[in-house]
C-alpha cells in the first residue's frame, strides 16, 4: 500500500513540475493538458485523475511556485548575511535567471497569468505575496516595519517588471542595459539590508 501511495505521489510531483515549467514557459493559454501530460510522461487521463482540470493544475503550480520563493528568501538571508539583498538582486537580473523561463522565478512569469483568473486565485496569490513581502521586509533596515514593507513591495515591483522587460527585448545590449539599471533602482528603493540573527536551537 505504501509503495502504491509513494508511486502516486511521485507521479503527481512529476506532473506538478511539468505543469509549473509549462505555464512559466508558455503561459496558461500557450499550453494544453495534452502538452503538460506529455512533458510529465503520463497520459491526459492520468493528468485529469490527479488534478481534475487545467485550472486546478495552474493553481497548484502557482501555489508551489510561490512557496519556493517563501522557502528561498530566508535561506538567502541566512547564507548572505548583510549582503543577502545584493546577492538576491544580482541573481534575479543575472543572465542565467533571465534565460531560464521554465525554472525561473514564478513572480515574473505567473503574475500576468493570475490577472486573468478569478477571485479565489487572486486571494490565494495575495496571501502568498504578503508573506513574501513580510520576509523581505524583515531583512531590511528601517524605522518601522511599515516602511520596510513599503520598500519591499516597491523593490519587488521593480524587479518583476525589470526582468520582464529584459526578457522581452531583442538585443543582448538592451537586455544588459535594462538589467544593470534595474539592479541599481531596486537596491536604491530597498535601502540597506540587515543581517538576520541566527536562532540558536
Image (cartoon, rainbow, N blue to C red):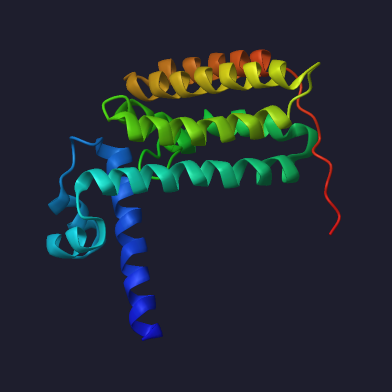
Q: Residue at x 48, y 15 (%)?
A: 178
Percent from the top left, x then y, of residue 59? 33, 43
Image point (78%, 18%), residue name = 142
- Tell me where residue 34 appears, x and y as whole percent: 13, 53
Residue 13, horizontal then vertical, whole percent: 37, 62
Q: Report the number of discs.
A: 0
Residue 127 x %, y %: 50, 34
**Residue in the picture at 40% in, 40% down:** 100
User: In which quarter of the view is residue 46 placed?
Assistant: bottom left
The answer to whether 167 appears left or right of 160 in the picture is: left
| Between 123 and 67, the one nearer to me in the picture | 123
Q: Report if residue 94 is visible in the image.
A: no
Compared with 150, 67 (above or below) is below
Front in this rendered view, residue 163 or 4: 4
Q: Quadrant of the C terminus?
A: bottom right
Instruction: Identify which residue, 111 or 191, lies in the foreground.
Output: 111
Please tell me whether residue 128 is drawn above or below residue 64 in the rendered image.
above
Q: Residue at x 25, y 56 (%)?
A: 51
Residue 80 appears left or right of 172: right
Q: Name the quarter where the N terminus is drawn.
A: bottom left
Residue 58 showing in the rendered view: yes
* Residue 193, quarter of the rendered image: top right
Amino acid at each position: 500500500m505504501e509503495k502504491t501511495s509513494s508511486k502516486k505521489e511521485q507521479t503527481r510531483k512529476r506532473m506538478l513540475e511539468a505543469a509549473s515549467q509549462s505555464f512559466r514557459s508558455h503561459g496558461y493559454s500557450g499550453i494544453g493538458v495534452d502538452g503538460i501530460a506529455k512533458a510529465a510522461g503520463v497520459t491526459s487521463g492520468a493528468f485529469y485523475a490527479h488534478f481534475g482540470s487545467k485550472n486546478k493544475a495552474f493553481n497548484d503550480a502557482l501555489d508551489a511556485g510561490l512557496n519556493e520563493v517563501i522557502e528561498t528568501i530566508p535561506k538567502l538571508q541566512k547564507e548572505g548575511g548583510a549582503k543577502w539583498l545584493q546577492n538576491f538582486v544580482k541573481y534575479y537580473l543575472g543572465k542565467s535567471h533571465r534565460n531560464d523561463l521554465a525554472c525561473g522565478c514564478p513572480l515574473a512569469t505567473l503574475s500576468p497569468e493570475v490577472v486573468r483568473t478569478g477571485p479565489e486565485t487572486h486571494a490565494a496569490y495575495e496571501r502568498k505575496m504578503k508573506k513574501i513581502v513580510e520576509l523581505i521586509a524583515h531583512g531590511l533596515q528601517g524605522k518601522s516595519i511599515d516602511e520596510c514593507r513599503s520598500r519591499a513591495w516597491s523593490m519587488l515591483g521593480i524587479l518583476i517588471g525589470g526582468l520582464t522587460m529584459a526578457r522581452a527585448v531583442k538585443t543582448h545590449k538592451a537586455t544588459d542595459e535594462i538589467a544593470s539599471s534595474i539592479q541599481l533602482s531596486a537596491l536604491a528603493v530597498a535601502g540597506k539590508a540587515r543581517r538576520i540573527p541566527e536562532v540558536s536551537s
